Amino acid sequence: MPGRGPHPRRDPRGHSYGLPEPKPTPFPADRWQTSEDYLYGIDLYNFAYWWECHEVFEGLWHTMGRNSEQGNFLQAFIQFAAANLKRFLGNEQAAQKLTRSGLARLQNLPQHYMGIDVIAFSEAYRVISTPLANSTPYQIRLALEPPSSLKASKI
C-alpha cells in the first residue's frame, strides 16, 4: 500500500525494483480475450491489487492511445482502481472525484465493451461508492463474458 511499505519500483526493497517497465502488446477491442496484459489487470483489480492494476492498465492506456476509445475505457478503470485505493487509505474526497471521472468516461461506450457490461458495472460501482455504503468492500468483480454470449445476445 502506498505510504505503508516500500515503493515497488523505486525502493530497493520493492518487489519490482530493478525490473524493466512492462511493455504491453496492443490488441483490438474485440480481441480483448487474447491480451494477457488486459486479463492480468482485471485479475489484479478483482483481488484488490489496485496499485498494481493501475500500473498495468496505465501501460495499456499508453500503448492503445490515450485519446482512443480503448484508451478512454482503460483510463476509466485506472481511475476506479485509484478510487478504491484512495478509499482504502481513507481519502474519500479523492475517491469520489476519481469515481465521478471514471463513470463519465464510460458514458459513451457500447453496453458491452472489452468483455465488460459497462452499464451494469457503472450502476453497481455508483451504488457502492455512495457515502452510505462506506462500510462495504469497495470492489466489483469484472465479468469477462465469452464472445459467444455476446453474439447470442444480439440475435
Image (tube, grey):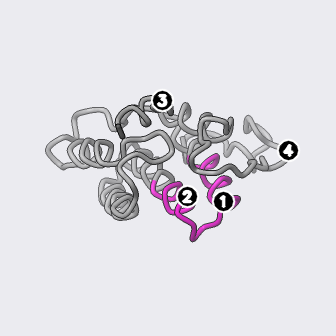
State the CA–CA distance, disc 1 to disc 4. Answer: 25 Å
Residue 84, numbered label: none
Residue 99, above or below 22: below
Residue 137 is situated, as x and y percent measured from the top left of the image, at 31, 32
Q: Which residue is mark 4?
A: 18
Q: Amino acid at mark 1?
A: Met
- Name the residue beneath numbered marker 2: 70
Main SS of residues in magenta = helix
Residue at figure coordinates x 55%, y 31% from the top left: 43
Residue at 51%, 59% in the rendered image: 75
Q: Earlier in the sequence, mark 3 or mark 4?
A: 4
Q: Are marks 1 and 2 in contact (CB under 8 Å)?
A: yes
Indicate yes or no whether the magenta region holds residue 71.
yes
Residue sitting at x 35%, y 35%: 153
Q: Which residue is mark 1?
A: 64
Q: Position of residue 61 (x, y in %)?
A: 62, 58
Quarter of the figure that contains the C terminus: top left
The quarter holding residue 94 reads bottom left
Within-10-Å neighbours for mark 2: few <14, some 14–19, many 20+: many
Q: How far apart are the two marked residues, 3 and 2, measured between alpha carbons?
A: 21 Å
User: Which of 17 and 115 lies nearest the eye of the viewer?
Assistant: 115
Amino acid type at image mark 4: Gly
Q: CA distance from mark 4 to mark 2?
A: 30 Å
- Mark 3 belongs to which amino acid? Ser
Residue 138 point in image, percent of width and height: 33, 38
| Crowding at mark 4 (Cα within 10 Å: few <14, some 14-19, many 20+) | few
Q: In the rendered structure, which amino acid carries the disc numbered 2?
A: Gln
Viewer-proximal residue among 91 and 69: 69
Q: Do the numbered discs 4 and 2 sit on residues whose CB atoms are within 8 Å?
A: no
Per the rendered image, the range of residues in magenta is 54-76
Q: Nearer the viewer, mark 1 or mark 3?
A: 3
